Amino acid sequence: MCASHVGDVPGHTESGTIALCDESMRHGPGAAAVYLLSAVIVPSTTLPAVRDRMSGLRLPGQRKKLHWRDESPPRRTLAASGLASLRADIVVATWCGMSPAKQERARRKAMETLLLDLGRRRVRHALFESRGPERDKADVAALAGLRRSGILPPSLRVSHAPGADEPALWSADIAAGAYSAAVSGAPNYWTAALRGSKGTVLTCGSCGTPHAPATAQELC
């Protein structure tokens, strides 16, 4: 469960599917405060192509990672189309009613929902963007509890990697941003992301309903 970069070793291949995962938060009063995790599921063998596609979305000369929050509306549309081109399965897990003082609890709950779904899909590897050593350790502790309880199948491996070092993770950032925009009333990015891809919004573990606008639900 330590930081890793799949495919660092020349000639290395991993069978099965990999879920590229990232977070986003929507702040607001009560249930409007939502912690969400997105997962972009692709065959592990396509990871080099995913990296190339995501890296190609950067502007000429841009060296920093692609970040949805920093992009203009036209660039977000381009990024959503780039995500759609991966023909991936996109999964979103949420936990609403997030307290600003309990964001880590909301993450643990959303992660449990997401990992349960990934386990049912027989995903082999879930790769999360690293949030730094201390927070990654908190993830590891939560995941250990899921394994001990038998909730998390032993076949599902979980690890972290820095977003700046793993362009494939940018796809999950795009998915999270496009979904969050849709829930906030701008569904065009989410709609673009799902052209050619399959989207699933999981039932929120907090309120028991999927947080998705009607336009998004029709496409999921």
Image (tube, rainbow, N blue to C red):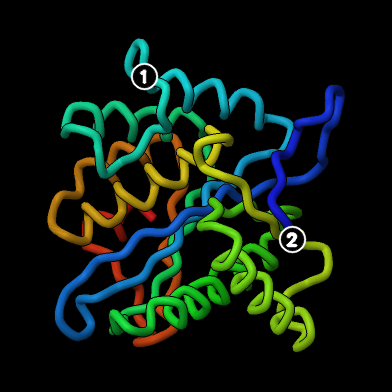
3D distance between C-alphas at marks 1 and 2: 31 Å
Tell me where residue 92 appears, x and y as whole percent.
44, 61
Taking the view exactly as shown, the residue that stands out farthest to the right is 11
N-terminal of the two: label 1 or label 2?
2
Which residue is at a point 77% across and 45% down the rendered structure image?
Answer: 16
Tell me where residue 88 appears, x and y as whole percent.
53, 40
Which residue is at a point 25% across and 38% down the rendered structure image?
Answer: 70
Which amino acid is tagged 2?
Met
Q: Secondary structure at mark 2?
A: loop
For the residue carrying disc 1, how many other residues have a C-alpha within 10 Å: few (<14), some (14-19), or many (20+)? few
Quadrant assignment for the N terminus: bottom right
Q: Secondary structure at mark 1?
A: loop
Tell me where residue 118 appears, x and y as whole percent.
64, 63
In this image, 212 relative to 201: left or right? left
Viewer-side residue, 44 vs 132: 132
Image-quadrant location for residue 76: top left
Figure check: 87 above or below 41: above
Q: Which residue is disc 2 drawn over? A: 1
Which residue is at a point 21% across and 70% down the rendered structure image?
Answer: 27
Tell me where residue 211 appears, x and y as whole percent.
30, 71
In this image, 15 relative to 219: left or right? right
Q: Which residue is disc 1 drawn over? A: 62
In this image, 82 relative to 178: left or right? right
